[in-house]
Image (cartoon, rainbow, N blue to C red):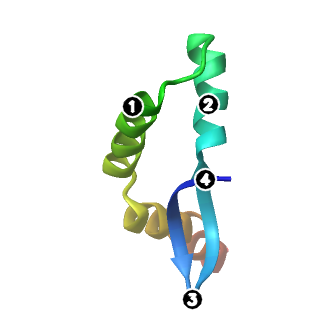
């Protein structure tokens, strides 16, 4: 299986990844077809550009940990 990128890698433990298979599954549902290799590269670059891993982690902490401490 070809991995598109590691979303968060903490001490070599992968927390989340998106695979080419994941991208193709979405393409099949949304476009009713598989993507070509050059289209996968375009989508891969857009995914990497749009995901702010720091903000996602900070938001998850704020929502789940800080919220819990306030109770």
Between the residue at mark 2 and the residue at mark 4, the CA separation in whole angstroms equals 12 Å
Q: Nearer the viewer, residue 32 or 69?
A: 32
Q: Are marks 1 and 2 in contact (CB under 8 Å)?
A: no
Between the residue at mark 4 and the residue at mark 3, the CA separation in whole angstroms equals 21 Å
Q: Nearer the viewer, residue 53 or 14?
A: 14
In front: label 3 or label 2: 2
Q: Nearer the viewer, residue 16 or 67?
A: 16
Q: Which residue is mark 4?
A: 2
Q: Where's residue 48, x and y in %?
A: 37, 51
Q: Where's residue 1, x and y in %?
A: 68, 53
Between the residue at mark 3 and the residue at mark 1, the CA separation in whole angstroms equals 32 Å
Quadrant assignment, res 67: bottom right
Element under disc 2: helix
In front: label 1 or label 2: 1
N-terminal of the two: label 1 or label 2? 2
Element under disc 4: loop
N-terminal of the two: label 3 or label 1? 3
Between the residue at mark 1 and the residue at mark 2, the CA separation in whole angstroms equals 13 Å
Q: Which residue is mark 2?
A: 24
Element under disc 1: helix
Q: Where's residue 54, x and y in %?
A: 39, 68
N-terminal of the two: label 3 or label 2? 3
Q: Where's residue 17, x and y in %?
A: 60, 58
Q: Which residue is mark 1?
A: 38
Q: What residue is shown at x 55% (from left), y 82% (from top)?
A: 10
N-terminal of the two: label 2 or label 4? 4
Specify few, some or many for label 1: CA neighbours under 10 Å numbering under 14, 14-19, or 20 or more: few
Q: Are marks 2 and 4 in contact (CB under 8 Å)?
A: no
Q: Which residue is mark 3?
A: 11
Question: Where 22 sits versus 13, above or below?
Answer: above
């Amino acid at each position: 299986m070809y991995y598109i990128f590691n979303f968060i890698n903490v001490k070599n433990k992968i927390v989340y990844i998106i695979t080419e298979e994941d991208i193709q599954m979405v393409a099949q549902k949304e476009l009713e077809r598989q993507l070509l290799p050059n289209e996968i590269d375009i989508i891969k670059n857009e995914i990497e550009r749009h995901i702010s891993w720091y903000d996602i982690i900070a938001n998850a902490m704020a929502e789940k940990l800080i919220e819990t401490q306030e109770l």
